[in-house]
Image (cartoon, grey):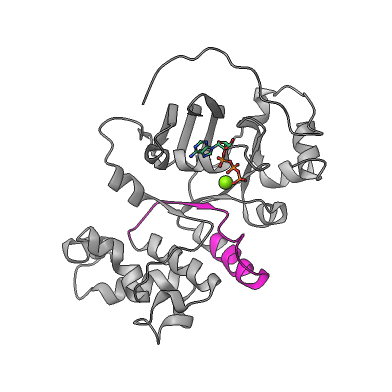
Amino acid sequence: MSTTQTEPEERPERTAAETDEPIDPAWTEYGFDGRTKLAVDSLDVHYGDERAIDDVSLEIPEESVTALIGPSGCGKSTFLRCLNRMNDRIDSARVDGSVTLDGKEIYGDSTDLVELRKRVGMVFQQPNPFPKSIRDNVAYGPRKHGEVETGMLSRLFGRGDGTNEDELVERSLRQAAIWDEVKDRLDDNALGLSGGQQQRLCIARCLAVGPDVILMDEPASALDPIATSKIEDLIEDLAEDYTVVVVTHNMQQAARISDQTAVFLTGGELVEYGDTDQIFENPESQRVEDYITGKFG
Ligand SMILES: Nc1ncnc2c1ncn2[C@@H]1O[C@H](COP(=O)(O)OP(=O)(O)OP(=O)(O)O)[C@@H](O)[C@H]1O
Ligand SMILES: [Mg+2]
């Protein structure tokens, strides 16, 4: 992580119809019950000289759904990728600040990125199954990590006897609410599934390596309304056991599925963060209210 200090920059132009209201730090202070899973402190991201995330601090509670909303280009995907260091793969990206997972800094040199990305899995906008069988897709991660044999199963199931890959595949597909649709065709190519099924398969593939946190970047935006509602139900169920952070453009979706909402606005600023009902019914910031009511964005 670079610690280079940069000169203060000009504020980016606000989106048309967005007011110049300054941010009140109190708007992003959110006192939640329960334990902090991820803590982000003074996070800045630049691509070359362009700032994409501007001094963002927030804490994400475990076993809940956190929605990230805001207009296109405000930095939602960039922020999400900071949570499992996917921005490391982008040459021009520079990340400053701190992110801890269960209290441990992930931006240290000693971080094992493979282990980190197993614990903090990611699901993308376009379902991206491998051109392999449904079974192979789910078993891919555990096989790659050699864990079907070496004990991940016994950890996941809490016992060591008689567990095998088939059980892990079934369990992951059940958790992703797609088992009944695919149980008789596990050896068929995953690309033969519908878009919504492919997305749930990708979620199963993510679950198969035993993550704590699941990051989702607009996971339903390429899907029809029925497939979308299945993904929404699934996200709510997953939050009983996992910490889910989901980017969405769909305000109703954020309101339906999330426990807390973070609103990013122009220039990668976190303007407001809090309980989802409060953000949607009674936001503190005028800019957030204008965004939510569709005056810009
Ligand atoms: N790989 C990259 N290289 C350079 N600039 C980038 C890169 N990725 C994103 N950016 C820039 O960073 C800013 C934030 O982009 P980001 O993709 O995080 O926004 P977003 O909120 O996810 O937008 P959208 O809602 O359209 O997906 C934008 O100005 C974008 O052009
Ligand atoms: Mg995005």
In the rendered view, tell whether residue 42 sits above or below residue 283: above
Q: Nearer the viewer, residue 125 or 257?
A: 125
x 48%, y 70%: residue: 198
The residue at 38%/78% (across/down) is 189
Residue 75 in sight from this viewpoint: yes
Q: Position of residue 172 (x, y in %)?
A: 39, 69
Q: Position of residue 48 (x, y in %)?
A: 48, 27
Give the magenta part as a residue range: 209-235
Asked if residue 173 lies in the magenta stretch, the reply is no
Is residue 94 or residue 249 the one in the foreground?
Answer: 94
Instruction: Identify the residue at horizontal 54%, vertical 33% (top origin).
Output: 58
Q: Residue furthest bottom?
A: 184
**Can you give x and y, in whole percent of width and height, for residue 269 in the image?**
62, 30
Vertically, is 167 above or below 245? below
Question: Farthest top residue?
Answer: 7
Indicate whether residue 217 is drawn in magenta: yes
Image check: 51 left or right of 242?
Answer: right
Instruction: Please give the name of the residue rendered at 57% of the width and 65% of the height, measured from the top-left corner.
Output: 231
Q: Quadrant of the N terminus?
A: top left
Would residue 16 be found to the left or right of residue 87 on screen? right
Rendered view: 74 above or below 253: above
Q: Position of residue 47 (x, y in %)?
A: 49, 30
Q: Quadrant of residue 146?
A: bottom left
